[in-house]
Image (tube, rainbow, N blue to C red):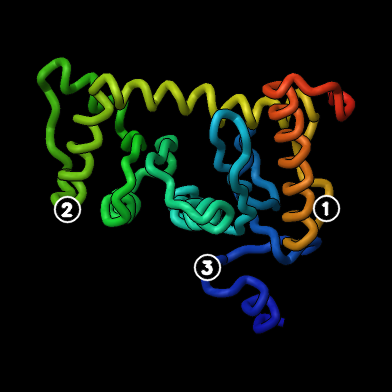
Amino acid sequence: MVNDKLDHMGEDRNLFGNTDKNATLMLMKNDSLGVGYNVQMATENQVIVGFGVFQDRADTYLLKPMIEEIEHNFGITPEVIMADKGYSSKKNYEYLACRGMKSAIPPHTFDYDILARHKGTYKSSENLTYEPYNVNMLDFLETEKGRELLNKRKWDVEPTFGDIKHNIGFRKLLLRFMPKVKMEVGLVSIAHNIKKIKTWLGMPQLVKEYC
């Protein structure tokens, strides 16, 4: 029995669900514990250009696979990556720098650090290997271009999730097990993209509105 559980979990998990052994026990949006998946989406002008369904609870480790997803879908490397604080880490900053990609990913302590800088009370992190990346990102995000990219993320990916949850009504997964969950998320992504693109093109209504 123990070996069976270890086989299901693999090396990257320490928990799984009894009704869906592909799923992981994780903290949900309402601060409650539940069995589920970490669904990631990459967008460009509110069009979903890539998605992923992961067992990992931490967003930090999912930046690289999502970039690889975009490269697989389009055959090109993204020029600029915008993401929230959950994706900030020395490893991610190093990866993006090595790939030659510009990034706007605030450090976890971004708000505190910016305020301290303006007050002249900023203190360097005790993590000396991480601090140069932290400072470089803070410097960039205080520029006009950096602030522009931070604002762009707010009206790009966040409204996409808002449309999926509030307009389409997709708030939780209905299927179990990884293959079916990926298919479910893929279909929802297609529905969102059709709605978005048909609006841009001024096409006649192709699908019913999900309200």
Residue 74 coordinates in the image, percent (x, y): 55, 52
Instruction: Using the image, determine if residue 47 lies above or below residue 52.
Output: above
Q: Which residue is mark 3?
A: 12
> In which quadrant of the rendered image does the C terminus lie?
top right
Q: Amino acid at mark 1?
A: Leu
Mark 3 Cα-neighbour bin, 10 Å: few <14, some 14–19, many ≥20: few
Mark 1 to mark 2 CA distance (whole Å): 43 Å
Q: Residue furthest top?
A: 119
Residue 35 coordinates in the image, percent (x, y): 70, 52
Q: Which residue is mark 1?
A: 175
> In which quadrant of the rendered image does the N terminus lie?
bottom right
Say which residue appears at 60% left-offset and 30% top-offset.
Answer: 46
Please, what secondary structure does the residue beneath circle 3 have? loop
Q: Which residue is mark 2?
A: 129
Mark 2 to mark 3 CA distance (whole Å): 25 Å
Say which residue appears at 81% left-offset and 61% top-offset.
Answer: 19
Q: Amino acid at mark 2?
A: Thr
Say which residue appears at 60% left-offset and 47% top-offset.
Answer: 50
